[in-house]
Amino acid sequence: MDTIWTRPDRGSRGPVPQHSRAEIVAAAVVLADAGGLSAVSMRAVASALSTGAGSLYRYLSSRDDLLDLMSDAVLAELPLDRPLTGDWLEDLVAVARDQLILYRRHPWLTEAARRQGALGPRAVDYFERCMAIMAPLPSAPSTKMETMAVLTGVVSLFAQPVPSNPPPGDPAAAEQQRVAAAHLFSLVDPQSHPHLTAAFTDAAQSPPAADLFERTVRSVLRGLLTP
């Protein structure tokens, strides 16, 4: 299969290269972090590198090549060499938590994950890590692959910057959530909404629930991988 990783780093013709693929990808990631994937064009990346857009085609055949390289490059930030505990559930939860941090650091990854792009070497390393964790489980290989896809979907959902999912330690987001809850409570009538009233009363008297992301990941993994 012809992908950006099976081709030479640059064409054999033309002037001596001014930049490496790694420099081009790094510039594109900076643009995407600031403005999303829509901010990443060959012209914009070339401008960030103080060169012409045409020169980038000596390294890449299309913008899709660049997006594939970007998506794979940031996966290098995942700590895939962390020692495993031997508990498959805890180890997969740790992978999911690291992936969530990565997606929040690079919000454009959620959109990039929906592309039918080519997988790169770091993506393969990620899959190998997950398969190694799941190796002791009797589930079929196809089930384990499906589990990785579902896990990425859950991470993408929780990576969205919505008021109901404030990042840990973000006081502004937490206050926004509190105000929204107070507004909802003001609309609740105990006679017409007895179930909501009971839920609000119970929530006020109960200790804080465990992290929703971790609870969701654990439930999904148990449902997919255990009998």
Image (cartoon, rainbow, N blue to C red):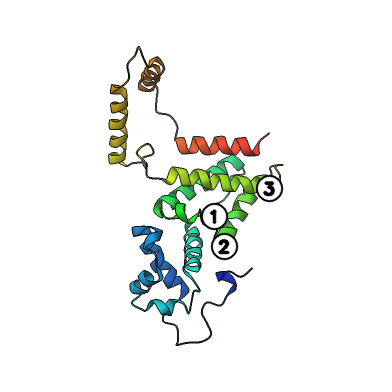
**The label number, if any, that marks residue 142 in the structure image:** 3
**Residue at left offset 34%, top offset 14%:** 190
Q: Is residue 17 left or right of residue 142?
A: left
Residue 97 pos. (x, y %): 48, 45
Q: Tell me where residue 7 sits by quadrant.
A: bottom right
Q: Residues within 10 Å of mark 2 (few under 14, many from 20)?
A: some
Residue 171 against residue 95 in the figure, above or below: above
Indicate the quadrant containing the N terminus: top left, top right, bottom left or bottom right. Answer: bottom right
Q: Would you name the residue on which mark 2 appears?
A: 118
Amino acid residing under circle 2: Ala
Q: CA distance from mark 3 to mark 2?
A: 19 Å
The answer to which of marks 3 and 1 sits earlier in the sequence is 1
**Residue at left offset 65%, top offset 46%:** 144
How many numbered circles does the render carry? Answer: 3
Task: Using the rendered image of the protein, determine whether residue 44 is visible from the camera's viewpoint.
Answer: yes
Q: Would you name the residue on which mark 1 appears?
A: 80
Task: Using the rendered image of the protein, determine whether residue 19 is visible from the camera's viewpoint.
Answer: no
Task: Identify the secondary structure beneath mark 1.
Answer: loop
Amino acid residing under circle 3: Ser
